Image (tube, rainbow, N blue to C red):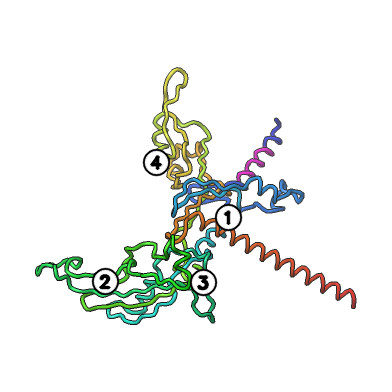
Amino acid sequence: MSKRNSKSQGNAERLEQLRTRVIIEKEGVESISSSEFPYHSSNHHQDIDYIKEFIKKFSVKIIRKEQYDMEFDLIGVDAAIANALRRIMIAEVPTMAIEKVYIYNNTSIVQDEVLAHRLGLIPIKADPDRFYFKQANESPTDMNTIVFKIEHECTFNPKAREDETDPQKLYIGHNLLSESLTWIPKGDQEEQYAGCPIRPVHNDILIAQMRPGQKIKIEAHCEKGIGKDHAKWSPVATASYRLMPEIILKKEITGDLADKFAACFTKGVVEVEDSYVEGQFIKCAKVVNPRIDMVSREVLRHKEFEDIVQLTRIRDHFIFNVESTGIMDSEKIFLDSVHILQAKCKRLLAALDHKLREQERDREQMDIY
């Protein structure tokens, strides 16, 4: 191979790496911005079918799925799509939450406004798909509102010892917890939710601490909303992603360096194995699970590894972690976010089509005159 061809191949490999990888350097990060769009480089021509390319590369792999916690890989998409799904999960998947609090009596030390705020942040186990968004001029109905009531009073415990100092033993009803929220079915809600009554997700959320003689009587109305309007409607505790780490070894690392190399990474990323080479066993470092690496760049601080290892992240491979507040299953949160993104795309295409039709009509009218 001629020097010219060798240089050309090297440049092509470098361009491909810059296109598909984020390069981790000792003092910074290189190739951050995506170049996955037409006409960016000479090897991407207008005759490429980007839809077919996307379908070929795109995949979703479920790594771990529990009812309220899920980890999955989103592969073959741009960061803009991954971030759009993350933001939709946080801010646009609707849920039910306490929106209006009618306070009939509150003699506790918790102010009415603070009490209402604390109640609003209690996650409510109710299927939002069965309810409509309540408009400002609408009255409450069984299709747009869920009603809870609290009637709670703190009293002395007659069985407590005279020298008792523990409030849990000294008083009855010392802590007002979320379990005190009593669902009051309206319309046919009791029949609809007979198998799964509407309730707070957790019964042990502290609302207020009280003393004998203090009373709280309230009525709380839940409405459908989205996290964009208030965080209480967000269905996720966390929804985050990170790029898949990649550790490239340019040559084998053996002997004592293998142990030092393994110590530079999160436990489990690199293992030191005994390899049989030239009639003897020697220690050899093997990258076994780059997924769990936190990319601390510790390895780049050692001169002996400078030309041996390269750290990158795969640009279109996103590791998602979604943790639900308990209102909805984590899988449903992700699927709902995909449907919402689809609806947004359809509205955008419809708006563009409408605009193009308007421009076409304007041109036809100009031709007439």
Residue with the mark numbered 3:
143
**Viewer-nearest residue: 236 or 286:** 236
Q: Label 1's element?
A: helix
Residue 267: image tag: 4
Q: Quadrant of the C terminus?
A: bottom right
* Residue 360 position in % (x across, y down): 81, 70
Residue with the mark numbered 1:
79
- Residue 11 lies in the magenta-colored region: yes
Give the magenta range.
7-17
Which badge, 2 or 4, comes first in the chain's sequence?
A: 2
Q: Label 2's element?
A: strand
Residue with the mark numbered 2:
209
Question: In the orientation shown, which residue stands out farthest toward the right?
Answer: 368
Determine whether 360 is above or below 327 in the image.
below
Q: CA distance from mark 4 to mark 3?
A: 52 Å
Amino acid type of the residue that numbered disc 4 sits on in the rendered structure: Lys
Q: Quadrant of residue 159?
A: bottom left
